[in-house]
Image (cartoon, rainbow, N blue to C red):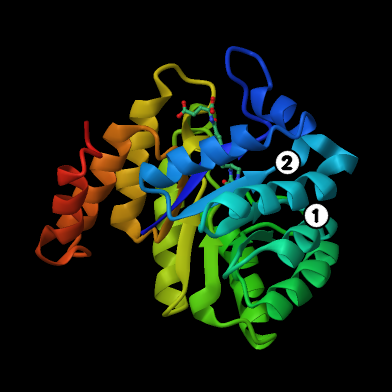
Amino acid sequence: MLIIGERINTSRKVKGEPVIENAVRARDAQFFIDLAAKQCEAGATYIDVNAGTLLEGEPDAMEWLVTTIQGALDVPLAIDSPSPAAIERALKVHKGQAMINSITAEKDRYNNVLPLAKEYETKLIALAMGDDGIPPDACGRMTVGRELVSNLTAAGIKIDNIYADPLVFPIANGAEFGLAVMDTIRTFKAEFPGIHASAGVSNVSHGLPQRKFLNQAFTVMCMTAGLDAAIIDPMDKQLMALVYATEALLGHDDFCMTYLEASRAGKFE
Ligand code: THG
């Protein structure tokens, strides 16, 4: 499973302070090099980069973040933005295969992001939402997602580069939301052989105390349903131990080599 480190997101606050946003505004390069490096050391294979709160400053910020992080580290990035302009600025300077996070079935967004995914041959997260918003249940998500993925493959995007995202909602807002995500992951993978599934797992715990337990449990649940990419906090060592353990238990880790290696490297303590 791809581990997409979630920490470089300007909407995150630490003790009420928008520390990530402040560091972007200050163009504090060392802050982002450290934050990316720590996530990589903890096991992240992609680093998510989201500067959405900068609004009109987002395209400049995205280009700067990509250049700054990849100037110090050899790691691919997930360009997390609804804005085609910001995505394009990021892709122009990105080295290696980027991941666009994300495309949707919204007409303008679809038409403007699709050519970027083709030109730069990126991986592409496809969110199950359209111009009428996010359908509330698994069935509605699949209706939108099915059409979106069909259009993407018809337009020449390789199925192996598509990561279908069912959209994770806070479990505090609806008891059925957890199972609906698992259902949607299974259905995408059954209907589109070769497709991948991704999810912003930490959304599930929004508004509840002791969030890490909900994030840990939900990561394991989604992996069991077939999740291939998780946007999570890799600096939670218990979470990472559960990820490696679950990979081994699902048969994705021959002879538990990765589990053993991570354990020996002290990643679980
Ligand atoms: N799908 C896709 N992209 C996404 C999301 C998605 N990008 C944004 C978001 N959802 C995923 N990223 C985050 C980042 C941080 C948090 C939640 C989702 C978050 N962090 C808290 C913090 O940093 O303080 C607490 C984390 C915790 O306690 O574990 O809430 O769904 N494609």
Q: Is residue 235 left or right of residue 140?
A: left
Residue in the picture at 68% in, 31% down: 11
Whether residue 174 is visible: yes
Sooner in the amino-acid sequence: mark 2 or mark 1: 2
Question: Which residue occupies the foreground of this view, 224 or 132?
Answer: 224
The picture places residue 260, in percent across and down from the top left corner, at: 13, 51
Whether residue 176 is visible: no
Residue type beneath disc 2 = Ala
Residue in the picture at 58% in, 18% down: 14
Decide if ligand 1 comes within 8 Å of the CB at mark 1: no
Q: Secondary structure at mark 2?
A: loop
Say whether marks 2 and 1 touch (CB < 8 Å): yes
Decide if ligand 1 comes within 8 Å of the CB at mark 2: no
Residue type beneath disc 1 = Ala
Q: Secondary structure at mark 1?
A: helix
Q: Is residue 82 left or right of residue 186?
A: right
Q: Is residue 254 left or right of residue 62?
A: left
The picture places residue 36, in percent across and down from the top left corner, at: 52, 42
Question: Which residue occupies the foreground of this view, 102 or 7?
Answer: 7
How many labels sit on residues? 2
Q: Quadrant of residue 102?
A: bottom right
